[in-house]
Amino acid sequence: MNAPLPAGQRLLLDDVSLDDKYALERGRVFMTGIQALVRLPMLQRQYDERAGLNTAGFITGYRGSPLGAVDQTAEKARKYLEAKQVRFHPGMNEDLAATSVWGTQQVNLFKDAQYDGVFSLWYGKGPGVDRCGDVFKHANMAGTSRHGGVLVIAGDDHAAKSSTAAHQSEHILKACGIPVLYPSSVQEYLDYGLHGWAMSRYTGLWVAMKCVTDLVESGMSVMIDPDRVKIQLPEDFALPPDGLNIRQPDTVLGQEARMINYKWYAALAYARVNKLNRIIWDSPRARIGIITAGKSYLDTRQALEDLGIDEQVAADIGIRLYKVGMTWPLEAEGVREFAQGLDEILVVEEKRQILEYQLKEELYNWRDDVRPRVVGKFDDTGEWSGSQREGHGNWLLPATYELNPAQIARAIATRISRYFAGHPVEQRVRTRVAYLEAKEAALNISSKPDPDKDRIPHFCSGCPHNTSTKLPDGSRGLAGIGCHYMVTWMDRETNLFTHMGGEGVTWVGQAPFTSEKHVFANLGDGTYFHSGLLAVRASVAAKVNITYKILYNDAVAMTGGQEFDGPLDPAMISRQLAAENVGPIIVVTDEPDKYPAGTRWAEGVTIRHRSELDAVQRELREKPGVSAMIYDQTCASEKRRRRKRNAYPDPAKRAVINEAVCEGCGDCSVQSNCLSVEPLETEFGRKRQINQSSCNKDYSCVNGFCPSFVTVEGGQLKKPARAKAAAAPSLPALPQP
């Protein structure tokens, strides 16, 4: 038997709650990066209260990986947010959310403000950052309020693991004049977040914080303490007499002058006095410097460890390590101190250069006699190697995909070999690199991914898109953003895609120059609500022949199954489309009888069963102009979730395959496109079976003529017999935490 917990430990555990990450005023708690972003405004409110300020907070934005769960997490924490005067409001799309953030900084321009200021947090993935370029520029030029401030949380998907494009936000944020902080841990999300709002208030700038998947989806034990971050305002930087914050009235050229002459330099001064960039390791005889930030900082530390280099070894052989917290603009005084006495600097950063270019600019006119060599994306060979531009050298740390510790370790090893040839550490590094390469070879992996090999996902079992994305023979479809995007790599004549909200509008540019008469365009319900209705309007204005397939799944499925950020249902969609002069409009569904009597459909709307999908599409493609089919079937994953909560009907019916009758033709897989129809190897060859644990009861597999299918109504799955539990080992009492 296990020993009982000591009384003191039991008492401690009795006081622990999963909500401690939001409820505790101070102390150590475990949380993920997403949860830290939601806790951050509460921490800012605590910080302001201690400073005697009565402020409020505002969170808004639009979900998307790696920030897909921000809205769900904020919703779960709503009572804790509201207790700290923080309001969460999910945006309809990214740029409208950013516009509402702009409005929070205008509150105190008018006499009826209820708070000293409103600090705001905007969140969105990389493409959303791109979408907001216009509002970011305007609002950043206008400025922030003295006791408000804006933090832009930019979620970057460097490896395009859940995006239609690999993304890096620093360059667009730089173009908008927004300083960029890059945390390297969940703790730094809290620390840098407080610095971000303080910098925003001091400089009048919007301030961004870059979040990547590896960090924001990780978790760690962090310190919650409003006194942890000691904010210092620069005393050696002269602000203009009227400050840098938002004002009314204002002029366009006045905003530009404040930005160019003061704001960015105020941000640099703030970064310098608060040591956002700092030397982590130093050496009395430093020859090689490594400068890095964010995730790349963690990868660099891992690479150094893999090479057997710790802080003492680095000091002995002459390696200096510099961690950058604010990647743009790069503070000059700190990097010049870092560069002092070095022969070479290795810049370790993912994607396109942001640190490397700034570093070279800061060092270019600085003491020509001691200026170190700088390498990063390319080495310094300057040789032609086929794929490189002449004079750029060979790739050292590529700008594609994402970096990993093995790549960084190799890069560091090449530089050590150059400067410390014959040194015992150099030989040890060679041995370590050989070990890493042997390990990769044994595991048949490469530190350089093959861009032509994708890990292909598929629609869930019972997904409506298994049926809705089918096309009649002779037709072609266009894709867009959403789960249905995955149809582009299936054999369904749907190819190419657009950004979110542009679905079908590529046809406006194609139609006048081709003999093809008509196309279909898939448009998810979440995207329709986000911005897609404008794409429909553009097609109507262009008078092209196109049928929009509005895929209504009753959830924004791809980002986690959230509800829409406002009212939306098939009848409302039909009325909106009709008002845009779209017609005819046909609703296709797996349950034609589910709509209540008196449902307010647009005039002329007809409702058909999904078994008529092919016929419906053949009819619509013959109609001139813009027509629409609203395909209404609930997301399969949402069905499963709701059934677990007894919030959705669960039919007492299951389909099974009699393997003795099955001939293995595979027609059931063709009919359903469903992953729950699995191969079954038998002594008579490969047949089919239905995985009952993953089946979402769509029943598409029953379509067609197959005598091997049996439907069982009212039956229950047999539960496997439980194995006899082994006696639990006796464990010593756990130590006090």
Image: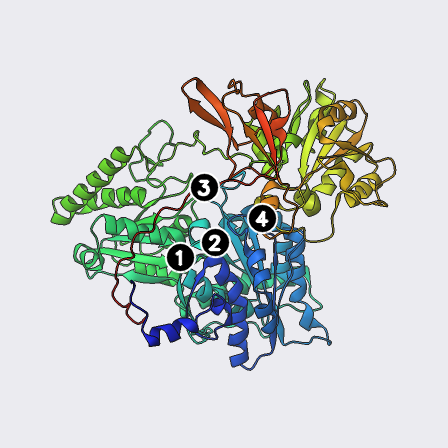
Report the quarter where the C terminus lies: bottom left
Say if mark 4 contacts mark 2, CB within 8 Å. Answer: no
Q: Residues within 10 Å of mark 3 (few under 14, many from 20)?
A: some
Could you say where residue 628 lies in the image, as x and y percent from the top left? 76, 33
Extreme residue in the bottom direction: 52
Horizontal relation, residue 390 to residue 710: left or right: left
Instruction: Look at mark 3 in the image and give the residue it sits on.
Output: 159
**Real-space Cα distance between discs 3 and 4?**
29 Å
Q: Earlier in the sequence, mark 1 or mark 2?
A: 1
Amino acid type shown at disc 2: Cys
Instruction: Look at mark 1 in the image and give the residue it sits on.
Output: 184
**Real-space Cα distance between discs 1 and 2?**
9 Å
**Real-space Cα distance between discs 4 and 1?**
34 Å
Amino acid type shown at disc 4: Arg
Local secondary structure at mark 1: loop
Amino acid type shown at disc 1: Ser
Residue 650's image quarter?
Answer: top right
Horizontal relation, residue 594 to residue 344: left or right: right
Instruction: Look at mark 4 in the image and give the residue it sits on.
Output: 641
Q: Earlier in the sequence, mark 3 or mark 4?
A: 3
Say if mark 1 contacts mark 2, CB within 8 Å. Answer: no
Label number found at residue 211: 2
**Real-space Cα distance between discs 3 and 2?**
13 Å
